[in-house]
Image (spheres, rainbow, N blue to C red):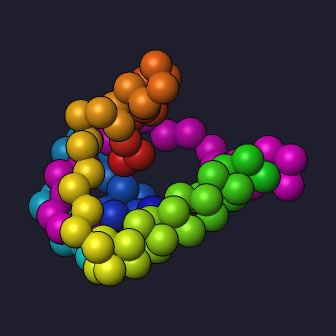
Amino acid sequence: MVAPVEAAIEGASIGSLVGPVKSDYGWHIIEVTERRPGKQLNFEESAEMVVQALQKHYFENELKELQEKFSVNIDEEALKNLGGIPAPAAAQ
């Protein structure tokens, strides 16, 4: 979490609304519904997430280079069900 959002959440009570809070990603209004203790993931628990994040990073860089080099039109609608496999929900 980005620092301004984390700071706003820490000072809020359960059931409250906090905001607006400005971060590098825009403005946020936050509803605190519960608190859960954080957990440090071990290597096995985080390995797949790291691999996917790296793959996404390299893919996006390669795609950006290709878009700059060639005229590329991406059919976002077709990507939602590529190969009959529904795309996962966007990360938030």
Q: Residue at x 25, y 62 (%)?
A: 72
The correct choice, above or below, for 62 with respect to 78 in the image is below
Chain part drawn in magenta? 25-45
Q: Residue at x 32, y 52 (%)?
A: 12
Q: Residue furthest top?
A: 84
The spot of residue 4 in percent (x, y) is: 33, 72
Q: In this view, does 58 lie to the left or right of 79?
A: right
Asked whether residue 20 is drawn in magenta, I would say no
The spot of residue 60 in percent (x, y) is: 44, 65
> Which quadrant holds residue 90?
top left
Q: Residue at x 79, y 45 (%)?
A: 45
Q: Is residue 33 visible?
A: no
The correct choice, above or below, for 64 with respect to 73 in the image is below
Which residue is at the front of the view, 24 or 35?
24
Which residue is at the front of the view, 74 or 90?
74
Q: Residue at x 24, y 43 (%)?
A: 75
